[in-house]
Image: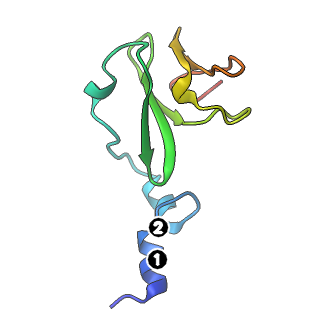
Amino acid sequence: MLSKADNEKLTRVGPGTPMGELFRRFWMPALLSEEIAERDGAPVRLRLLGEDLVAFRDTQGRVGIVDAYCAHRRAGLFFGRNEDCGLRCVYHGWKFDVDGIC
């Protein structure tokens, strides 16, 4: 039987945890492609491994999953505009591509 400490170590998957770091090394399904079928459509919220994320499909049809909050002032990218191959923050206009590069 596992100790409480070992159980915690094996079941916590948030950032900075042993299992979280392990899972982040591998591909895993996050949502169905049909859920973000429209190019330049509305972003989709999701939570994966304890992190809030936003998924979107850009103008060229590529799918991106990025942090749910802008790096500048933590504005919600869910409310951003999906345009011209990127997700634009409504707070200050920074645009993030499918790789999360601003």
Q: Residue 59: which quarter of the image? A: top left
Residue 23 place in picture, x, y as percent: 43, 57
- Cβ–Cβ under 8 Å for marks 1 and 2: yes
Spatial separation of the CA atoms under disc 1 and disc 2: 6 Å
- Relative to 41, residue 23 above or below: below
Could you tell me if residue 15 is visible in this image?
yes
- Relative to 78, residue 10 above or below: below
Could you tell me if residue 99 is visible in this image?
no
Amino acid identity at mark 1: Glu
Q: Circle 2 is placed at which residue position?
A: 12
Q: Residue at x 46, y 67 (%)?
A: 12
Dot 2, how many residues are within 10 Å of its Cα: few (below 14), some (14-19), or many (20+)?
some
Residue 33 appears left or right of 45: left
Q: Residue at x 34, y 15 (%)?
A: 38
Q: Residue 57: which quarter of the image? A: top left
Q: Circle 1 is placed at which residue position?
A: 8
Q: What is the image's colouring?
A: rainbow
Dot 1 falls on a residue whose secondary structure is helix
- Relative to 53, residue 94 above or below: above
